[in-house]
Image (tube, rainbow, N blue to C red):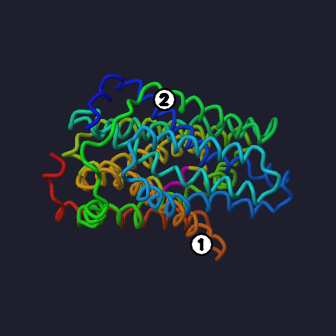
Amino acid sequence: MMTRFQNNRRFILFIFMMGTFAVGMTEYVVTGLLTQFAEDLQVEVSTTGLLLSVYAISVAVFGPLLRIITIKYPPKPLLIGLVSLFVISNIVAATAPNFEVLLLSRLLSAMMHAPFFGLCMLIAIQLSAPEKRTGVIAIVQGGLTIAIMIGVPFGSYLGGMLDWRLVFWFLVVLGLIVLVGLLLAVPNETYSQKPQLKQELKALLNKNVLWVLAIIVFGFSAVFTAYTFKEPMLREFAGFGVTGVTLGLFSFGVGAVIGNFTSGRVVPRALTKTLMLALLVLAVVLAVFTVLLQVPALAIVVCFLFGAGTFGTTPLLNAKVILAAKEAPMLSGTVAASVFNLANAIGATLGTVFLNNGFSYQMITWIAAGMILFGFVLTLITSRVEDKTLYE
């Protein structure tokens, strides 16, 4: 299928990574602009948190539905349609006259998130030799991690110093560049065999896939239980101001990029063992997080380790879902991206509930560490029951 993709492999992967950078920046940049939204659109800061939760829920719910509806569409027109939706949604955000319209723009941009990631990962895998599948998944995911390292701080600075609407206009420009890249690089080919929706849905229900999805939901969700409150923890425990917090967030982003591309070097047969090790390290980091934050120099280090552990784990889980669902190539990447966002929403909600019920930040990080350990146990069980021939 789509053999001509091989001709422009590197350029296509670069365009995909630029696309995931833009989508990742869109998802996370609002965390640094909540005050500006509240002041300009005359709503409470607490209300602006809906911009995050609505996005995550929309990715988890509407992303797979959109992909199911479009499963038989050829890849190039579908990619163009998804990026066009991204551009339109950010134009809506940049020109939003009130908070309700801005919220609608988040719903629209989130709808294309999971299908776009899924289709990019599918094509990237088809471009690559079997032993490099984890690596190309990391390349696609790499745009998201670079967005966390560079895009989010840049967007927060641009919005804070000038106007938050300029951030969305910047994203419109990025989207248009990606759109041109797709038009130039991706051949307009059709599938040699039409995807079968029933067969793909059935493949997603096999035990190999369900165990990995359980690890993401019940284990990886712990990451956002702690991540959501990283900024106030840096202020409370490390005593950081704006500069220190920015440095801590940047350190997290650097760790995310390094962790992502390091995990991309893991060969498929070593995915499960590496995942167990990554989860153990991440659990330890979260367990000692608030302790190390009290020493400013160590605070920067532990933020780096938190980022490396979080996004060093993500490509491994993505690869396990996609490889375990070989008979569902059209849906597996989309479902993986959707479930990650579901886990994000669960983690953030749990953290908020715990905090509102009198739990300290330290207790929250301990709970997160315990949840990660539960994910480790699920991974250990998975290693005993999964079909290992899927990763050969």
Q: Which residue is mark 2?
A: 183
* Residue 210 image point, x, y percent: 30, 66
In the image, taking residue 235 as reference, residue 297 lies left or right, namely left
Q: Residue 260, image x and y in percent? A: 41, 40
In the rendered image of this protein, does residue 225 appear above or below residue 195?
Answer: below
Instruction: Give the CA separation, mark 1 to mark 2.
Output: 47 Å
Total numbered labels placed on residues in the image: 2
**Residue 203 placement, left or right of 92:** left
Give the left or right position of residue 96, taking residue 137 as reference. Answer: right
**What residue is rendered at 66% in x and 73% in y?**
356
Instruction: Name the N-terminal-most of marks 1 and 2.
Output: 2
Answer whether residue 153 is magenta in the image.
no
Residue 263 rendering spot, x and y as whole percentages:
34, 40
Task: Give the main secondary structure of the magenta stretch.
Answer: helix
Q: Which residues are magenta?
A: 288-292
Q: Give the structural element (helix, strand or loop) at label 2.
A: helix
Q: Few, some or many C-alpha atoms within 10 Å of disc 2 (few <14, some 14-19, many ≥20)?
A: some
Task: Name the residue type under label 1.
Answer: Phe
Q: Secondary structure at mark 1?
A: helix
Question: In the image as oriented, which residue stretches furthest toward the bottom?
Answer: 357
Image coordinates for residue 227, horizontal then vertical, percent: 56, 55
Residue 27: mark in rendering: none
Amino acid type assigned to the residue bearing label 2 in the image: Leu
Residue shown at the point (77%, 41%) measured from the top left:
165
Residue at (35%, 50%) from the top-left corner?
318
Give neighbour class at mark 1: few <14, some 14-19, many 20+ (Cα, 10 Å): some
Please tell me the numbered disc located at residue 354: 1
**Does 289 appear in magenta?**
yes
Task: Name the residue: 33% across, 40% down.
Answer: 190
387 or 117: nearer the eye? 117
Residue 158: quadrant of the picture: top right
Say which of marks 1 and 2 sits in front.
2
